[in-house]
Image (cartoon, helix red, strand yellow):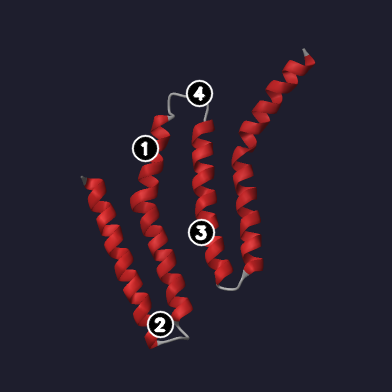
Amino acid sequence: MALIGILMVTLFQLVVIYLLLLIVSFASKSLQPIIYAAIFFFFLSYVGITIIIPFGKTFMDLFEPLPGSYAKLLIGSVFLFYFSEMIVKHVAEAGYESIAEIATLAIKIAILSLWLPQLSMLLNTLSKFIIK
């Protein structure tokens, strides 16, 4: 029941944000991109805190019995990549495609750096099998 309430509040806030963007588009054309970006990031953080992070924690609890931290790394990587894709798409639509490409590269390197300790353990194990 609480989930339905959260979803209804989020839907109501989407409608309010849409109406606010319509009002801004009629009032001031020059401030519209700034206000749109501010509302986008505010709403993205709100949705992330109220819906996506609790869902991610619940989803990670499902995979807790598995050995190692592969499930947590995989779920964290997916959420990080998804959030970065939304932000990169927003930046690219604003006309900054070169910055969006750099941000995509940075996020991919960050995700790979999260996996480096697990990858080094895997390479050590494989090298022990090859040597013996």
Quarter containing the C terminus: top right
Spatial separation of the CA atoms under disc 1 and disc 2 = 39 Å
Instruction: Tell me the distance, in whole angstroms, between the alpha carbons under discs 1 and 3.
Output: 22 Å
Measuring from the top left, give residue 40's x and y in whole percent. 43, 66
The structure residue drawn at horizontal position 27% and vertical position 63%, both measured from the top left corner, is: 12
Note whether 9 is above or below 98 in the view shown: above
Of the residues under marks 2 and 3, which one precedes in the sequence?
2
Q: Amino acid at mark 1?
A: Thr
Please name the amino acid that badge 2 sits on.
Answer: Ser
The CA span between labels 2 and 4 is: 53 Å
Residue depicted at x 37% and y 56%: 47
Q: Position of residue 37 (x, y in %)?
A: 46, 71
Which circle's residue, 2 or 4, is located before the other in the chain?
2
Tell me the residue at 63%/49% (across/down).
108
Query: Where is mark 2, residue-wise?
Result: 25
The residue at the far right in this view is 131
Tag shown at residue 86: 3
Nearer to us of marks 1 and 2 is: 2
Q: Amino acid at mark 3?
A: Met
Seen in the image, is 66 located left or right of residue 129? left
Within-10-Å neighbours for mark 1: few <14, some 14–19, many 20+: few
